[in-house]
Amino acid sequence: MMEWIEIGGLDDIPRRGARTVETPQGEVAVFRTHDDEVFALVNRCPHRGGPLSEGIVAGRKVACPLHNWVIDLNTGMAEAPDEGCTTSVAVRNDAGRLWLEVTVAQRKVG
């Protein structure tokens, strides 16, 4: 069973930006694309643990601010030579209010 917490409004996140949310499983980065799509990932790059929330969002991807690894916002998969992934977290937009699944430990991708 999924448990959801309300984390704010869509307008609380800048377009092509992110904000972080503390959960019982750790810090989660919630991203907003230019087209107002919303994605959430555990806020750690699979390469060296960089804060993805501080990266540059382009389309449905974010570039880690430490070494420019590109991470797919939908899957958490890295587009790098030795690959890797971070954990994708379910997020939903309900009439402009954002909800985050708090059981992230069960959502490991890859």
Image (spheres, grey):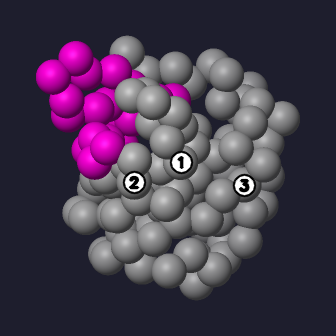
Q: Residue furthest front?
A: 66
Question: Which label's residue is closer to the chain start, 1 or 3?
Answer: 3
Query: What is the chief secondary structure element of the magenta stretch?
Result: loop
98 to 39, vertically: above or below: below
* Residue type for callout 1: Pro
Instruction: Tell me which residue sits at (84%, 35%) in the image.
Output: 24
The secondary element bearing badge 1 is classed as loop
76 within the magenta span: yes
Report the Cα–Cα distance between label 1 and label 3. 13 Å
The secondary element bearing badge 2 is classed as loop
Instruction: Tell me which residue sits at (45%, 36%) in the image.
Output: 45
Residue 38 in sight in this render: no
- The residue tagged 1 is 51
Quadrant showing the C terminus = top left
Is there a contact, CB below 8 Å, between mark 1 and mark 2? yes
Q: Which mark is residue 65?
A: 2
34 within the magenta span: no
Q: Which segment did they paint magenta?
A: 67-91
Quadrant showing the N terminus = top right
* Residue type for callout 3: Val
- The residue tagged 3 is 21
The x and y percentages for residue 96 are 59, 77
Give the number of the mark in front: 1 or 3: 1
The x and y percentages for residue 67 are 32, 44
* Residue type for callout 2: Pro
The secondary element bearing badge 3 is classed as strand
Q: Is residue 47 left or right of residue 70?
A: right
Q: Where on the picture, by quarter, is residue 9?
A: bottom right
50 to 20, vertically: above or below: above
At label 2, counting other C-alpha atoms closer than 10 Å, the crowd grade (few under 14, some 14-19, many 20 or more) is some
Question: Which label's residue is closer to the chain start, 3 or 2?
Answer: 3
The x and y percentages for residue 94 are 61, 67
